Amino acid sequence: MIPRYSRKEMTDIWSPQSKFKIWFEIEAHACDALAKLGVIPESAAKTIWEKAGEVEFDVDRIDEIEAVTKHDVIAFLTHLAEIVGDDARFVHQGMTSSDVLDTCFNVQLVKATDLLLEDMDKLLAALKKRAFEHKDTITIGRSHGIHAEPTTFGVKLAQAYAEFERCKNRLVAAREEIATCAISGAVGTFANIDPAVEEHVAEAMGLKAEPVSTQVIPRDRHAMYFVTLGVIASSIERLATEIRHLQRTEVLEAEEYFSPGQKGSSAMPHKRNPVLTENLTGLARIVRMASVPAMENVALWHERDISHSSVERMIGPDSTVTLDFALNRLTGVIDKLLVYPENMMNNMNKFRGLVHSQRVLLALTQAGASREDSYRLVQRNAMKVWEEGKDFLTELLADDEVTALLSETDIREKFDLGYHTKHVDTIFDRVFG
């Protein structure tokens, strides 16, 4: 995490103070449950909340203790004992470090996911607004980067909306996947702590009890979560790449907003570069980078090892913070995106009617020509446009083989742009309901 690509709302979730606050809540809720079971005095559970429930934990002091103990949870518990006093001996009864660490990590991931879902809603709203704004703005569709057939810019944005709606649904499922709690002891058998404690802590922390936790929460859950973040990042990159292509000088159908006073190049004052979407492409790579180590974390030794720990200390904050920033940046790009319908039309007409070749091909087959002959006739005239700068309609009308099959009226009708947009309403109904 670096400040340049971070938002405070997300980084606060991963701060040491936030982590220690969650650790305390897990321990204190466990004490409440233990008190109800008669394992520890109710007065002790009450004292723990009263003395430490509202304090700011001394991060430097915990680090100082850890420098000696070489164990972060013990360092925290030692500091907590300094605050609580004698009743601190009842904290962590029958628990193991992973009960605290894994449950806390999942709480942090759930909090982070809730922010990401808010981000997704904002992005979806921006895409929907701009899609309807340009529902009928005709532009050229491209395959292999080459002109294909007409579409609308609204359809392009509707496709992005549908994609990010799928991403949101995946993220909801991923949240459900990692919203589990483990308070089950050394190898997950509840030998020294009642399962009721886990149930109580889970409910208090907004989680559900992990069915079988060995000593750790199974990491297939986290693998699914981080892969989901990687898929969302890929969708961000797909849309960012589209905008980057559309902003190219020789295309210039859409463009990132260029604010007053903004500079594009230290050497060339004329430059207006797609810096935000290029940045999004890079950030997507960082989020996706977590997918492989998250999957490699699944295979731990026996009931547990800590090979996953160092990985998660990095990918947890880095992936969520980066994705949060990227989603907000993309929303801003879409909100302020400059769209140039006139350039879209000029680009579509650059090759003088070639985009209508399929309609002519189909008309010839329906008029009795074989597909092979129809293709030959259309391609013959199309190549004159590519190679000699001819006009496609003019060449077709001058081709005796074509006019022997199709009348002038039939040929001209095949150049109607409205033909290509007649089902836009159907697409929008499917996407937006």
Image: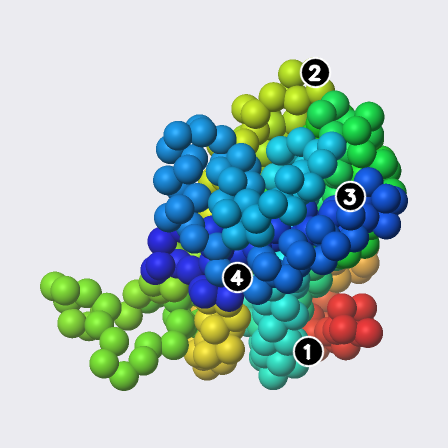
Residue at (28%, 70%) from the top-left corner?
272
Residue 418: numbered disc? 1
Separation of marks 3 and 1 at Cα, in angstroms: 77 Å
Left or right of 400? Residue 35 is: right
Q: Nearer the viewer, mark 1 or mark 4?
A: 4
Secondary structure under the numbered disc 1 in the rendered image: helix
| Three-letter code for the amino acid on which mark 1 is drawn | Gly
Picture layout, residue 260 above or below residue 365: below
Secondary structure under the numbered disc 4 in the rendered image: loop
**Which residue is under mark 2?**
302
Q: Do the CB atoms of the residues marked 3 and 1 lie less than 8 Å apart? A: no
Report which quarter residue 297 is drawn in: top right
Q: Earlier in the sequence, mark 2 or mark 1?
A: 2
Q: Do the CB atoms of the residues marked 1 and 4 lie less than 8 Å apart? A: no
**Which residue is under mark 4?**
55
Q: Earlier in the sequence, mark 3 or mark 4?
A: 3
Q: Nearer the viewer, mark 2 or mark 4?
A: 4
Q: Residues within 10 Å of mark 1 (few under 14, many from 20)?
A: few
Q: Residues within 10 Å of mark 2 (few under 14, many from 20)?
A: few
Q: Nearer the viewer, mark 3 or mark 1?
A: 3
**Residue 310 showing in the rendered view:** yes
Separation of marks 3 and 4 at Cα, in angstroms: 23 Å
Secondary structure under the numbered disc 2 in the rendered image: loop
Q: Do the CB atoms of the residues marked 3 and 2 lie less than 8 Å apart? A: no
